[in-house]
Image (cartoon, grey):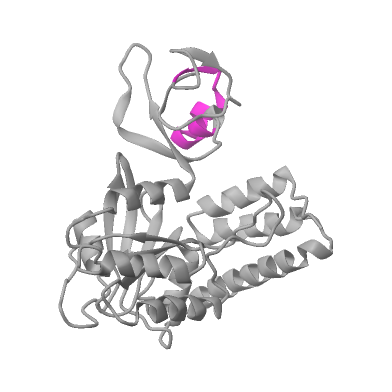
Amino acid sequence: MALNLTPDYFEADRKYRQARTPAEKLAALEEMLRTIPKHKASEKKQSDLKRRISELRQGELQKTKKSTGLDPYHIERQGAGQAILIGPPNSGKSSIVGTLTKAPVKITDFPYGTPTPVPGMAHFEDVPIELVDMPPVTPDHLPGGLVNAIRNADTVLTVVDLTAESVLEDIDGLLAALAAKNIEFGRSEADGEEEMRVGPHGIILCNKMDMPGAVDTFQMLKELRPAEPEMMMVSGRTGENLDLLMRNLFGLLDVIRVYSKEPGRPADRDKPFILPAGSTVQELAKHIHKDLAANLKYARVWGEKTYDGQQVHGHYTLHDRDVVEIHA
């Protein structure tokens, strides 16, 4: 039986994926629960939504009760989105973050060289994406704070060592441990395009592809493992495929870049506005300043979907790399 999800539901789902605070996530989840069709086929989805809402409410309640102390795993999200790296000791998480960012990671030849989370800012072209190097984990050791960080991230990069004899067990063990916490990265059960995602995307990063035998090991893993979550080879040491990783992360964020332009002046391409895919001119104006949105008359847009300087209304849907000149 099809879920028959409504446009209102998909809009709430989009708001959830772009939410940056627990309050925003909670509001979006509640809207998703309110708008999801109530029938037998959606019972599992309804239950999942109710669980997430309960966890968020409980988490916020605990925060209000705590007058002292900080969660060492909580890293405030910055940039267009946040991807956290988890993996067993010596899998090479720190080398990947160190190559892509200027973060002060500590790359060691001994296990547990990262005692606390280390954030850094990487870029896909002109889009900043935050990477967080998490302390090493094992299937038997998933701290509660780390689990919460995983749930609140946009993407989780599970890093494994292609030269380790236990690489298959490392992947399966970590994914099973996360599944036991109700965190799964595969496509949710739904008909057609009616997919509901509550939580982060996931990629398995098979690191150290530059080492002898690593490519053959990767091919073996592809034959033995399901197609989801996606697996890709990288090398934190040489930087191989890290550009492809950043492109994939940008795609998973489901955002667009928009550049502003003042009348008679060239576009400001130094710092794009990062908006959820599907955003309109009105939403861009509101993002810039609420008064600008209130007084919006029309806009001119330069982009692949328009002719140069095409006049559009506030409900016009923007596309990646559009240049927008707002008239109020």
Indicate whether residue 140 is drawn in magenta: no
Q: Nearer the viewer, residue 170 or 302?
A: 170
In the rendered image, the residue lying farthest to the bottom is: 140
Q: Is residue 67 visible?
A: no
For the point 46% across and 49% down, the residue is: 253
Note whether 144 is above or below 228 in the view shown.
below
Left or right, 281 with reference to 122: right
Q: Nearer the viewer, residue 71 or 150?
A: 150
Quarter-of-image position of residue 270: top left
Left or right, 18 with reference to 73: right
Q: Pinpoint residue 287: horizontal percent, then vertical percent.
A: 47, 37
In the rendered image, the residue lying farthest to the right is: 39
Left or right, 276 with reference to 27: left
Q: Split into 4 quadrants, where in the image is the N terminus? A: bottom right
Q: Pinpoint residue 116: horizontal percent, then vertical percent.
A: 28, 76
Q: Pinpoint residue 215: horizontal percent, then vertical percent.
A: 29, 64
Q: Is residue 211 visible?
A: yes
How many numbered markers are drawn?
0
Left or right, 6 with reference to 319: right
The region drawn magenta spans 283-302
Q: Nearer the viewer, residue 43 or 23?
A: 43
Quarter-of-image position of residue 174: bottom left
Q: Pinpoint residue 137: horizontal percent, then vertical percent.
A: 36, 80
Indicate whether residue 296 is drawn in magenta: yes
For the point 24% across and 82% down, the residue is: 112
Note whether 127 is above or below 110 in the view shown.
above
Note whether 170 is above or below 269 in the view shown.
below
